[in-house]
Image (tube, rainbow, N blue to C red):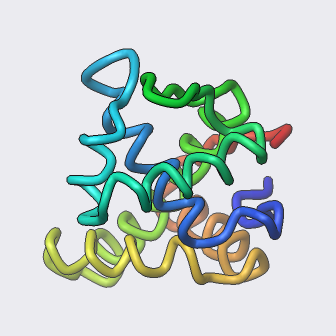
């Protein structure tokens, strides 16, 4: 099981953009630059700059003035980030008994900053306590 290890090129900003695109693709097959900018609360030019980095990392498909879609690699990263969030959220809500809103906000912060060792230890602990295995993405 390994829910913690990420390519060091996947900065917090890269991760957040992938999450936003993944969330937008839950309701539509592609995302638009305007929607990403609104979700991130930045300008379209900032989004365009970030999308170039994501494209170089092989995380998105995007041509200038077109839609944005996660590649298979981007989808795997998005799913892994979602799993990390869910794991931390479950721990905070179900084990530490924090309110849903607080647990969600804390999980958003922690999913990007916890060390691989801490995340993997948390995965083992939560699985043991809840009796529920967590499936993790591999092959990023």
Question: From the viewer's perspective, is residue 111 above or below residue 63?
Answer: below
Q: Is residue 108 left or right of residue 13?
A: left
From the top left corner, tell me how far across and down residue 41 is, in percent.
24, 65
Q: Quadrant of residue 139?
A: top right
Q: Quadrant of residue 113?
A: bottom right
Question: From the viewer's perspective, is residue 7 above or below residue 12?
Answer: above
For the C terminus, give its image quadrant: top right
The mark total stands at 0
Question: From the viewer's perspective, is residue 56 above or below residue 128?
Answer: above
* Furthest residue in direction top, as rendered: 29
| Residue at left offset 59%, top offset 60% | 14
Taking depth in this image into account, of 37 and 6 the one nearest to the observer is 37
From the top left corner, tell me how far across and down residue 86 is, in percent.
42, 56
Taking depth in this image into account, of 34 and 118 the one nearest to the observer is 34
| Residue at left offset 77%, top offset 62% | 6
From the top left corner, tell me how far across and down residue 46 is, in percent.
43, 61
| Residue at left offset 54%, top offset 68% | 13
| Residue at left offset 30%, top offset 61% | 43
């Amino acid at each position: 099981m390994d829910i913690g290890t990420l390519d060091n090129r996947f900065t917090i900003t890269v991760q957040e953009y992938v999450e936003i695109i993944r969330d937008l693709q839950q309701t539509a097959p592609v995302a638009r630059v305007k929607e990403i900018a609104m979700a991130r609360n930045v300008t379209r030019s900032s989004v365009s700059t970030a999308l170039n980095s994501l494209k170089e990392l092989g995380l998105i498909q995007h041509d200038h003035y077109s839609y944005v879609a996660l590649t298979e690699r981007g989808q795997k990263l998005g799913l892994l980030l979602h799993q990390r969030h869910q794991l931390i959220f479950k721990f905070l809500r179900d084990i530490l008994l924090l309110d849903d809103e607080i647990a969600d906000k804390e999980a958003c912060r922690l999913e990007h900053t916890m060390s691989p060792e801490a995340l993997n230890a948390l995965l083992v602990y939560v699985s043991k306590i809840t009796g529920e295995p967590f499936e993790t993405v591999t092959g990023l």
